[in-house]
Image (cartoon, helix red, strand yellow):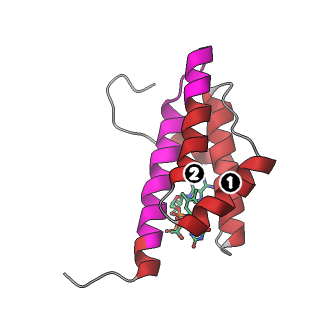
Amino acid sequence: MPKLGNATIKAELGRSSWKLLHTMMARFPERPTKDQKTALRSFIYLFSRLYPCGECAKEFQMILEKHPPQVSSREAASQWACAVHNIVNRRLLKEEFDCSTIADRYKCGCAAES
Ligand code: FAD
């Protein structure tokens, strides 16, 4: 198999990571408990510290300062993730995603999906 260049690896990592994040939000409870809200908020901040692309992590931490995670509901979390992904898209000169379609886009194929 040919060796992947750094840009390709970074892009693959990004695609997988966004997929994980958006799918997590799509499965986040509609009415989360206090503990679930704390868990999601902590996950996002830890993710921003540990994300393996250093430059991306730094940028994402700056985005979080202005746009802190919204964890009050599934809808709030999904819209927040869509909005911050769009901020990254804009910076990388990529097309913006229509966040009104987010609920239909991310499904995990898990049991009892609602
Ligand atoms: P991606 O942006 O990876 O998106 C994958 C798919 O998600 C798209 O094809 C589309 O179907 C869908 N999508 C697009 N926008 C949205 C949205 N707003 N909401 C929901 N779904 C959407 N790369 C850098 O070069 N520099 C960086 O600083 C950088 N920072 C990053 C920070 C984070 C937290 C993450 C997760 C990734 C970062 N990346 C960064 C990677 C970058 O965002 C892309 O993932 C990568 O360039 C591949 O882009 P792509 O065009 O394949 O689509």
Q: Amino acid at mark 2?
A: Arg
Q: Where is mark 2, residue-wise?
A: 49
Q: Start and end of the magenta stretch?
A: 10-39
Q: Is residue 32 magenta?
A: yes
Q: Which mark is residue 52?
A: none
Report helix, strand or loop for mark 2: helix
* Above or below, comparing residue 31 to residue 57 in the picture: above
Name the residue furthest right. 66
Question: Does residue 55 appear left or right of residue 66 in this picture?
Answer: left
Q: Residue at x 55, y 43 (%)?
A: 46
Q: Is residue 75 magenta?
A: no
| Residue 10 image point, x, y percent | 46, 71
| Residue 97 image point, x, y percent | 64, 58
State the quadrant of the N terminus.
bottom left
* Ligand 1 quadrant assignment: bottom right
- Observer able to see residue 97: no
Does the beta carbon at disc 2 come under 8 Å from ligand 1?
no
> Are the residues tagged 1 and 2 within 8 Å (C-beta)?
yes
Question: Does residue 36 appear left or right of residue 62 in this picture?
Answer: left
Report helix, strand or loop for mark 1: helix
* Above or below, comparing residue 68 to residue 34 in the picture: below
Name the residue furthest top. 33
Sequence-first tag of 1 and 2:
2
Main SS of the magenta segment?
A: helix
Q: Residue at x 67, y 41 (%)?
A: 79
